Amino acid sequence: MIRLGEAERSAFGDVLQPLAVEWLRENIDAPALVVMAQVVLRYGGVGVPAFTEEVARYAMIWMTLLATSVAVWEGSHIHIDFIPGLVMQYVPRLGAALEWLLSCISLGVFLVLLWQSFDVVAFAYGQKSEGLQIRLAFPYAVMPMAFGAAAVFAAMRLVVKAPAYD
């Protein structure tokens, strides 16, 4: 296992994770603004351009997937914590090892999703969206970015937040 000093342990959490969270905070209102514009235009009698629904949908999907990758770093993603927590109460070393194993499995899942997302983007390249008439590879491009970031965050959790066996 890689042993990191306190400075190295906090470097990732102090630099990359706050940047990702700040970007999400600054851009979280984009899907909401598009939806609000749709409502105002619809009830204002002007009519809603067809592409706005797609923009809102793609923006929400992008924000959700990117926020999920940040949740992996924070440990607030969906994961099994009941069994390791229960074991941790009685046998701390075994509970920590089980938590580490489950984190390794999560990393494996993210790597498989990353690998498969490239096929999805390549497949979507030949299709066009209904309203925007753009190649669907562009909205789907968030998948490799989000799953790649989730894999990096999961790997960094294994290294930076590794359980202490001392």
Image: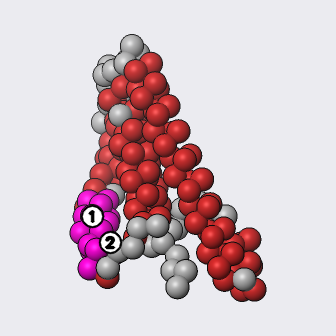
Q: Estimate the x, y position of residue 24 in percent, counting from the top left.
A: 31, 59
Residue 52 falls in image quadrant: top left
Q: Residue furthest top?
A: 126
On the image, numbered disc 2 is attached to which residue? Answer: 13
Q: Which numbered dot is residue 16? A: 1
Category of crowding for the residue at label 1, using alpha-carbon neighbours closer than 10 angstroms: few (below 14), some (14–19), many (at least 20)? few
Taking the magenta stretch, the answer to whether it contains residue 139 is no
Q: Estimate the x, y position of residue 23 in percent, counting from the top left.
A: 26, 59
Horizontal side of residue 52 vs 77, given as left or right:
left
**Of the residues shown, which amino acid type is indicated by label 2?**
Gly
Range drawn in magenta: 7-24
CB-based contact (under 8 Å), mark 2 and mark 1: yes
Residue 117, placed above or below residue 106: above
Residue 136, placed above or below residue 6: above
Q: Estimate the x, y position of residue 119 in percent, counting from the top left.
A: 46, 24
Question: 104 and 62: which one is in front?
Answer: 104
Question: 90 and 110: which one is in front?
Answer: 90
Horizontal side of residue 69 vs 33, given as left or right:
right
Residue 29 falls in image quadrant: bottom left
Residue 77, placed above or below residue 83: above
Task: Note whether residue 81 is visible.
Answer: no
**Of the residues shown, which amino acid type is indicated by label 1?**
Leu
Question: 28 and 32: which one is in front?
Answer: 28
- Measuring 51% from the left and 39% from the top, which residue is drawn there? 113
Q: Estimate the x, y position of residue 93 in percent, counting from the top left.
A: 65, 79
Which structural element holds mark 2?
helix
